[in-house]
Image (cartoon, helix red, strand yellow):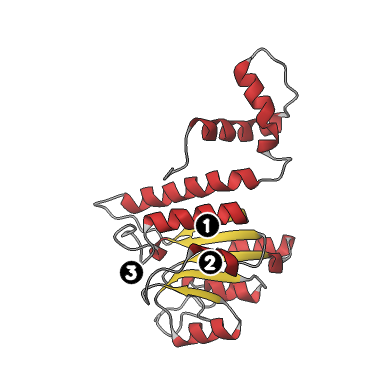
Amino acid sequence: SNGVFRAIAEKKKSRDITILHIDAHLDMRDTDADYNDAPFGKYAHSCVLRRAVELGFPTVHVGIRAYAKEEYEFAKVNDREIFEWGTGDPPPIESIIKAISTEKVYITFDVDGLDPSIMPGTGTPVPGGLDWNYTLKLLQALAENKKIIGLDMVEIIPRFESNVTEFGAAQLCYHIIGLALPKLPSEGGLAFKDEIQKKQMNPSLSSDISPRASFEELKLLDLQKSHSVGE
């Protein structure tokens, strides 16, 4: 995730893009030296969101249920919005959407944010995470109210006896892409929707669709023929 955050910050104003962080952990240590005998340093997986804050991104954290004192204090000093799990009923989805102050949102999704009964193939599973239906509803509300500009899906560790985690992560990626596509700029693939539909009705019609749009056409046609996961 760090490489993506740095690239975005170089091209865009980081303060205009909120990072929605779905995870069991805050990932706001300064380094991993307090628990790792051979530390990676400031770019360890437990430090990713701290680096994002340093780059100037607003962040909202969902599913959090394991953190060090250092992380929690850093988050509070920097006015981070934290939605903890395991302290009662899950928060209303509307409260999470309201906490996102920008129009544009980048999703960084650690699979251990979900309950390990759903995503067992991960390095540091923590019981009591998000359930599947709540997650889909959250993503739907996010797409309806904000503009999803990108995502990453991390911390997947394949298990020999089951591919349920990999398959679930793939479903989530596919679902988020499907939700995000209608929010693409008008010059993107969806600008060609009417022309594509005309071509479907009458393939003999000429079209001035640019060759560069062919991949977007295929994606749109595929989405028209199938429904997003969970619908």
* Residue 99 location, quadrant: bottom right
Q: Are marks 2 and 3 in contact (CB under 8 Å)?
A: no
Picture quadrant of residue 9: bottom right
In the picture of the structure, the residue carrying the numbered disc 2 is 96
Which quadrant of the rendered structure holds the N terminus? bottom right
Q: Where is residue 120? Give x, y as percent.
A: 31, 60
**Residue at 72% from the left image edge and 64% from the top image edge:** 10
Q: Secondary structure at mark 1?
A: strand
Considering only order in the chain, which callout, 3 or 1, is on the residue closer to the N terminus? Answer: 3
Mark 1 or mark 3, whichever is nearer to me: 3
Q: Secondary structure at mark 2?
A: helix
Amino acid at pointer 1: Asp
Earlier-in-chain disc, 2 versus 3: 2
Report the Cα–Cα distance between label 1 and label 3: 22 Å
| Of marks 2 and 3, the one in the foreground | 2
Q: Which residue is mark 3?
A: 128
Instruction: Point out residue 227 in the picture as x, y percentages from the top left corner.
Output: 47, 37
Q: Does residue 183 appear in this view?
A: yes
Q: Residues within 10 Å of mark 3 (few under 14, many from 20)?
A: some
Q: Position of residue 195 (x, y in %)?
A: 69, 26
Frontmost of labels 2 and 1 is 2
Q: Using the image, tell me which numbered label, if any, was put on residue 152.
A: 1
Q: Quadrant of residue 147?
A: bottom right
Please name the residue shown 56% across and 30% down the image: 221
Question: Which of the pair 141/50 is nearer the observer?
Answer: 141
Mark 2 residue type: Ile
Label 1: how many Cα within 10 Å (few below 14, some 14–19, many 20+): few
